[in-house]
Amino acid sequence: MDVVDLMRYVGALAVVLGLLGTAFVVARKYGLPGVVAPQGSRRLVVAETLLLDARHRAILLRRDDTEHLIVIGPNGTTAIESSNRTSSIPGRTQ
């Protein structure tokens, strides 16, 4: 195998990877069904995270009109509280 063949293989690989990357960007931008969901249609959002210590983290998740406070640590995940968003913090505006 000489240098010309090697350059041809590398060039073909670059073209294929470029086409795959372009297809991924287009699918992500337009949200093609079954490939990638558009960014605006997500129901689950990580609202806040707080590092409690070196091994534990508190995470506030929002799903539809409900907030879930969970703590993640080395022994697993624990749900601390689940409530409606409107009643979770007094005086909070939505």
Image: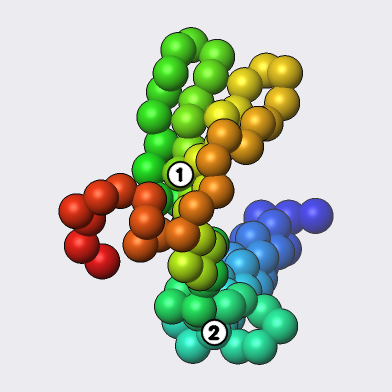
The numbered dot on residue 88 is none
Residue 68 location (% of width, % of height): 53, 48
Disc 2: which residue? 31
Rendered-image quadrant of the C terminus: bottom left
Q: Amino acid at mark 2?
A: Gly
Q: CA distance from mark 2 to mark 1?
A: 27 Å
Q: Nearer the viewer, residue 88 or 23?
A: 88
Up the image or down, 71 lies above or below 16; here it is above
Q: Position of residue 78 (x, y in %)?
A: 65, 31
Residue situated in front as seen by the camera: 11 or 47: 47
Identify the element where label 2 is drawn: loop
Mark 2 and mark 1 lie on one chain; the one further toward the N terminus is: 2
Residue 53 in view here: yes
Residue at position x 51%, y 69% in the image:
64
In-image side of 75 versus 86 (left or right): right
Q: Where's residue 79, x and y in %?
A: 62, 37
Task: Read off the residue under disc 1.
Answer: 60
Inspect this view and state whether residue 45 appears.
Answer: no
Which of the 4 quarters of the picture holds residue 49?
Answer: top left
Using the rendered view, name the quadrant where residue 93 is placed: bottom left
Image position of 36 with respect to 57: above or below = below
Question: Element at badge 1?
Answer: strand
Decide: few, some or many residues near mark 1? Use Cα within 10 Å; few <14, some 14-19, many ≥20: some
Left or right: 73, with 63 as reference point? right
Q: Is residue 94 left or right of residue 71?
A: left
